[in-house]
Image: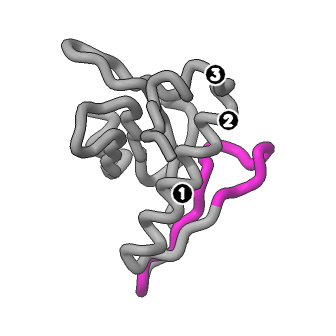
């Protein structure tokens, strides 16, 4: 089986498909890290995931993705949306990690 070229694959997928895949990726990584998380239905207001950290209330997670490029880049979101955490997924990164993601509290994302 040949190596999957994420940059070429991303061009063939719709923005919706890539967004859904990134939400699944973040939900899986959170769950594997001991924070159960699930995607919410598409018509759910303001966020893409709900996570349940131990001994804390449910947390709303907004997931944004973009293809990696060198230099300045922006990840934008609607400031009117209500969420607790922002997960940013970068696709098509250089090896050895072809994709990367970070999760930041909303209070930090808004700065």
Depth check: give the residue in front, 60 or 22.
22
Q: Is residue 28 left or right of residue 71?
A: right
Crowdedness near tag 3: few (<14), some (14–19) or many (≥20) residues, C-alpha within 10 Å: few
Name the chief secondary structure element in magenta.
loop
Q: Give the SS element for disc 2.
A: helix
Q: In the picture, residue 60 is in which quadrant?
A: bottom right
Q: Earlier in the sequence, mark 1 or mark 2?
A: 2
Residue 40 x, y percent position in the rendering: 70, 56
Crowdedness near tag 2: few (<14), some (14–19) or many (≥20) residues, C-alpha within 10 Å: few
Q: Is residue 31 magenta?
A: no
The answer to the question of whether label 1 and label 3 lie on touching residues, with beta carbons closer than 8 A, is no
Can you say whether 81 is above or below 35 in the image? above
Q: Which mark is residue 60?
A: 1
Q: Residue at x 41, y 24 (%)?
A: 67
Q: Which residues are magenta?
A: 39-55
From this viewpoint, which residue is outermost toward the bottom?
55
- Nearer to us of marks 1 and 3 is 3
Q: Give the SS element for disc 1.
A: strand
Q: Which mark is residue 17?
A: 2
Q: What is the spatial separation of the Cα atoms under label 1 and label 3, in whole angstroms?
A: 30 Å
Q: Which mark is residue 3?
A: none
Q: Is residue 41 magenta?
A: yes
Q: Which mark is residue 12?
A: 3
Q: What is the spatial separation of the Cα atoms under label 3 and label 2, in whole angstroms?
A: 10 Å
Q: Residue at x 53, y 44 (%)?
A: 22
């Amino acid at each position: 089986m040949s190596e999957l070229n994420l940059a070429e694959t991303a061009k063939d997928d719709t923005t919706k498909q890539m967004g859904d895949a990134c939400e699944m990726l973040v939900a899986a990584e959170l769950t594997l890290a001991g924070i159960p998380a699930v995607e919410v239905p598409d018509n759910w207001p303001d966020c893409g995931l709900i996570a349940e950290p131990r001994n804390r209330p449910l947390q709303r997670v907004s997931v944004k993705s973009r293809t990696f490029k060198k230099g300045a880049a922006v990840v934008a979101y609607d400031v009117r949306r209500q969420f607790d955490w922002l997960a940013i997924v970068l696709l098509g990164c250089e090896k050895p990690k072809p994709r990367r993601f970070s999760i930041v509290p909303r209070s930090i994302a808004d700065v």
